[in-house]
Image (cartoon, helix red, strand yellow):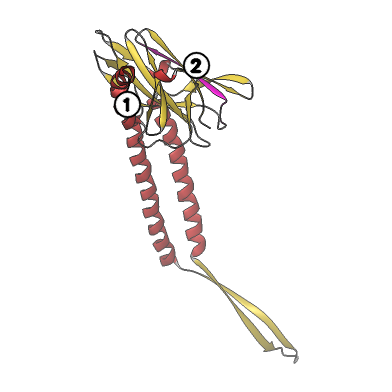
Amino acid sequence: MVQLSHIMKLKSYLPLMAIAIIANSCAPGFYYRPDPAETPQANTFISNGLTYAVSKNVSTSVALTAIKPENSKLELSIVYINNSLDRVDAIPDDIKVTAKEDSTVRQYQVYNADQYLAKLQRRQNFALAMQAGSASYYNNQAGYTTKTTNTNYVSSNGIYTTGTTTTTTYDPSKVAALNATSQQQLQQTANNFSSYNQTLSQQLIRSNTLLKGQSIAGYVIVNTSNSFSEIIYVDVPFGGEEHMFVLIPNR
């Protein structure tokens, strides 16, 4: 028999679960789960294989989990819900993240959406420049053809001599064709970057004012090191209330 308390718990978390499904639909496999020593199971729910911790205060609620792609930044998948009658501000920039790594506790920078997108754009522009430069060099080298011919002749004094003759030619039409193909590939890479950035921009949370019963979900990027943390502490201020989370690797 299903207990009434379980039914009420599921009912109260349904909005969070529905939003979280959208938020983590493309999430990778490795993530940080709520520390069971700090988070009662009753304050968790599972969405798309990820366990979210839920913090419910008087006026606001927050659900959160953390995703860590290998050799990448930490991604907080977070849901804000306004339970009050008043307007409240959800400001991801105010989130504080500290992590314990090798017995050392460090505080990490939390990017706002536009800041992270600008940083990502700079990296992509550098990658495009490197792709264009390497393609130009390769294509130019491919335009040269070197032919070596063995030669045999007898000198005026009757001495028989062998040798080689090397001839190098340059084909501009071949280079032009290769450059055209490379330009198409470069444009495709740029289009892929642009499409990715547009999708990411929609997924990253920006500061919002939520009215009664409104919610917002998405991602916040944290500038952590590439290594995995032993434990992560996340402090989410929201509507004048503090929501604290303790996460550990899901191993």
Mark 1 Cα-neighbour bin, 10 Å: few <14, some 14–19, many ≥20: many
In this view of the protein, which residue sits in the foreground, 103 or 33? 33
In the displayed structure image, the side of residue 66 where residue 217 appears, left or right: left
| Residue at the spot 40% in from the left edge and 35% down from the top edge | 27
| Residue at the spot 45% in from the left edge and 50% down from the top edge | 132
Q: Amino acid at mark 2?
A: Glu
- Residue 238 pos. (x, y %): 37, 12
| Residue at the spot 43% in from the left edge and 25% down from the top edge | 65
Looking at the image, residue 82 lies above or below residue 247: above
State which quadrant residue 86 falls in: top left
Chain part drawn in magenta: 228-238
- Residue 65 seen anywhere in this rendered image of the structure: yes
| In the image, residue 230 lies in the stretch drawn in magenta | yes
Q: Residue furthest front?
A: 1
Mark 2 Cα-neighbour bin, 10 Å: few <14, some 14–19, many ≥20: few
At mark 1, the secondary structure is: helix
In this view of the protein, which residue sits in the foreground, 71 or 68? 68
- Residue 145 pos. (x, y %): 52, 70
Q: Quadrant of the N terminus?
A: top left
Q: What secondary structure do most residues of the magenta stretch adopt?
A: strand
Residue at image mark 1:
17
Looking at the image, residue 86 lies above or below residue 146: above
Q: Amino acid at mark 1?
A: Met
- Residue 148 pos. (x, y %): 60, 76
Which numbered disc covers residue 38? 2
| Residue at the spot 34% in from the left edge and 45% down from the top edge | 191
- Identify the mark nearer the N-term, 1 or 2: 1
State which quadrant residue 87 falls in: top left
